[in-house]
Image (spheres, rainbow, N blue to C red):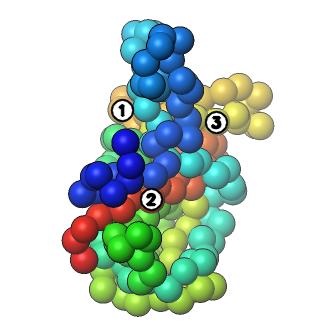
C-alpha cells in the first residue's frame, strides 16, 4: 500500500519489522513477549539518553497536546507536536514519549522553532534498561513495581526518548 491510501498512519511502524517467510507481502514484528509468545509491533524509534537530557526541536511547529501522562502504560508522560511543513500534502505529527514527569513543558498552542527545548528525556511508562548500580536488567512496567524497581527507575534506568511520526489529513 501507498502512504496516500491512508487518512492517518505511522511512518515508523515498519522500521522494526521483517518480511514473513511466506509468499505474501506481509510483515511480522521483530519484538515479542517471551512469556506469552505474543508478537507485537513496536511503532516508533527509541533513542537512549540520560534522564533529564533536553530534547531540542529540529523543525518549526506547534505543540498540540502536552497533558499526556499514561502513568502505568506504554508511553508514560508524552506530548504531541505538529510540524508546519507538510509531507505529500499531509500534516506531520510527532509523538514524544517516556518523558521526564518532573520537568516543565511547552503548553498546547505554543509555537516553537529549531533549537527550542520542547521536552526532557525520562523513563516514564513501560521502559527496559540496565542498572549500572546493581548490575542487572529491569523491565519497568509501572504496574505493581516493588521497591527495587522503583529505586531503579529513580536512578534513571530505562531512560530514553520514543519518537513516532504520523501523517494526517486534519490540521
In this rendered view, identify the residue nearer to me: 120 or 11: 11
**With respect to residue 127, does 47 lie above or below?**
below
Q: Which image quadrant is residue 148 in?
A: top right
Q: Identify the residue under disc 1.
A: 143
Q: Position of residue 41 (x, y in %)?
A: 43, 32
What residue appears at the point 59 percent right and 85 percent down from the top-left corner? 114
- Compared with 83, 131 (above or below) is above
The answer to whether residue 99 is visible is yes
Q: Earlier in the sequence, mark 2 or mark 1?
A: 1
Q: Nearer the viewer, mark 2 or mark 3?
A: 2
Q: Secondary structure at mark 2?
A: strand
| Picture coordinates of residue 35, whole percent (x, y) | 45, 10
Closer to us: 167 or 108: 167
Q: Is there any visible trace of residue 69 in the rendered image? A: no
Local crowd at mark 2 within 10 Å, few (<14), some, or many (≥20)? many
User: Separation of disc 2 and disc 3 at Cα?
Assistant: 24 Å
Mark 2–mark 1 distance (CA, rounded to whole Å): 27 Å
Q: Which residue is located at x 50 percent, y 85 percent?
A: 60
Among the 4 quarters of the image, the one containing residue 39: top left
Instruction: From the image, state whether disc 1 or disc 3 is nearer to you.
Output: 3
Which residue is under mark 2?
A: 165
Work out which quarter of the rendered image holds the N terminus and state it: top left
Looking at the rendering, in which quadrant would you find the C terminus? bottom left
* Dot 1: element: loop
Q: Which residue is mark 3?
A: 129
Q: Is residue 14 left or right of residue 159?
A: left
Q: Are marks 1 and 3 in contact (CB under 8 Å)?
A: no
The reply to whether the C-beta atoms of the residues labelled 2 and 1 are less than 8 Å apart is no
The image position of residue 97, as x and y in percent, is 45, 55
Amino acid at each position: 500500500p501507498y502512504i496516500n491510501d491512508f487518512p492517518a498512519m505511522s511512518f515508523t511502524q515498519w522500521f522494526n519489522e521483517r518480511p514473513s517467510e511466506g509468499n505474501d507481502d506481509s510483515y511480522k514484528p521483530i519484538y515479542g513477549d517471551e512469556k506469552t509468545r505474543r508478537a507485537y509491533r513496536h511503532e516508533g524509534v527509541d533513542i537512549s539518553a540520560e534522564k533529564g537530557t533536553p530534547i531540542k526541536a529540529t523543525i518549526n511547529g506547534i505543540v498540540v497536546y502536552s497533558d499526556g501522562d499514561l502513568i502505568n502504560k506504554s508511553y508514560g508522560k508524552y506530548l504531541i507536536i505538529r510540524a508546519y511543513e507538510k509531507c505529500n500534502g499531509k500534516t506531520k505529527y510527532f509523538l514524544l514519549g517516556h518523558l521526564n514527569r518532573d520537568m516543565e513543558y511547552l503548553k498546547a498552542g505554543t509555537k516553537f522553532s529549531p533549537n527550542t527545548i520542547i521536552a526532557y528525556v525520562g523513563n516514564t511508562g513501560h521502559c527496559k534498561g540496565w542498572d549500572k548500580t546493581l548490575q542487572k536488567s529491569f523491565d519497568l512496567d509501572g504496574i505493581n513495581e516493588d521497591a527495587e524497581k522503583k529505586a531503579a527507575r529513580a536512578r534513571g534506568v530505562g531512560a530514553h526518548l520514543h519518537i513516532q511520526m504520523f501523517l494526517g489529513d486534519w490540521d
